[in-house]
Amino acid sequence: MKIETLLTPYFVESENMFANSLVVSIDVLRASTSICAALFNGAKEIIPVDSVDKAAQIYSNLSREIRLLGGERNMIKPDGFDLGNSPLDYTEDKVKNKTIILTTTNGTKAFLKAKQAKIKLIGAFVNQSAILHYIDSCLNNGINMIYFLCAGNQSRMAYEDVLCAGAFLHFLNKVNDFELSDSSLAAMNLFELHSNNIYEFIKNCEHPKKLIEVGLQADIEICLKTNAYNIIPIFESNSIKKISI
Ligand code: MLT
């Protein structure tokens, strides 16, 4: 089986490229991590949306008791939103049994890609083991290709997403005989290079630097907590729910 890593969500999509594939979409800082936090804390589902207007529209059609509007633009909670995009916002008292309409600058747009995939998961450092176990359980289930789809930053590569893909690849490659594309090999090698001190390295990367500048350093620390949330978020029809494990 081959594993391809899409370093940004802007790739040429060929016909049937995602047929029978399993795709793990990654936006470490912070959409993937916030989704894991929300599901871990009892949210019913997350509906990812690519624009603030669309999100507000869907929100206005849901009943008051069950709905929350979450996300960011330029890292900041838009006016009128209930929640931002910090994993710390998605606490049990706020999100339990709620439907969350989420729109973020890069993450939710990336999650909406690869629509033809047989299985679509949301991955991050915080749910690394859960995703690895799930991938393992799918290997004999008609899956013939695995993709890691990195959300990136404004159509460009984001180092932290590639490191996270690399971490998945590192552990998968230890116990299986996969064929790794060049981008997968590069991601895995980068992770192995930095695995002992990811925070020290990424604090100088583009998006983390901006988060630190606006006082969101604590978010980065949470987003790098490996296996903090034992959650498998699966994206089916239009919403992301957790698979019970
Ligand atoms: C995004 O989707 O671009 C991010 O999750 C940005 C962020 O809130 O840090």
Image (cartoon, rainbow, N blue to C red):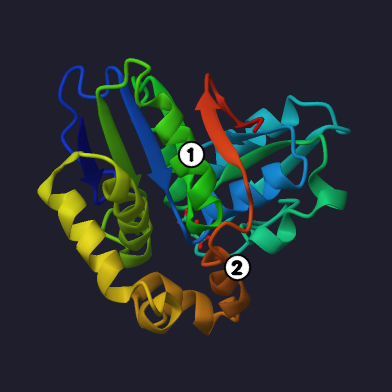
Name which residue type carries label 2: Ile
Q: In terms of image quadrants, where is residue 167?
A: bottom left
Q: Residues within 10 Å of mark 2 (few under 14, many from 20)?
A: many
Task: Give x and y (percent) for residue 81.
Answer: 71, 51
Residue at x 71%, y 63% (from the top left corner):
88
Amino acid type of the residue that numbered disc 1 sits on in the rendered structure: His
Q: Is residue 90 above or below residue 118?
A: below
Is disc 2 in contact with disc 1, using a CB cutoff of under 8 Å? Answer: no
| Numbered disc 1: secondary structure | helix
Q: Position of residue 103 (x, y in %)?
A: 55, 45
Question: Could you tell whether 73 is left or right of 1 in the image?
Answer: right
Residue closest to the eye, 215 or 123: 123
The residue carrying mark 1 is: 133
Checking the image for residue 222, the label placed there is 2
145 lies left or right of 70: left
| Residue depicted at 42% across the width and 51% down the height | 106
Residue 143 appears at what percent x and percent y? Answer: 31, 21
Looking at this view, name the residue that lies furthest to the front.
Answer: 175
User: Which of disc 1 and disc 2 is earlier in sequence?
Assistant: 1
Q: Is label 2 in a helix, a strand or a loop?
A: helix
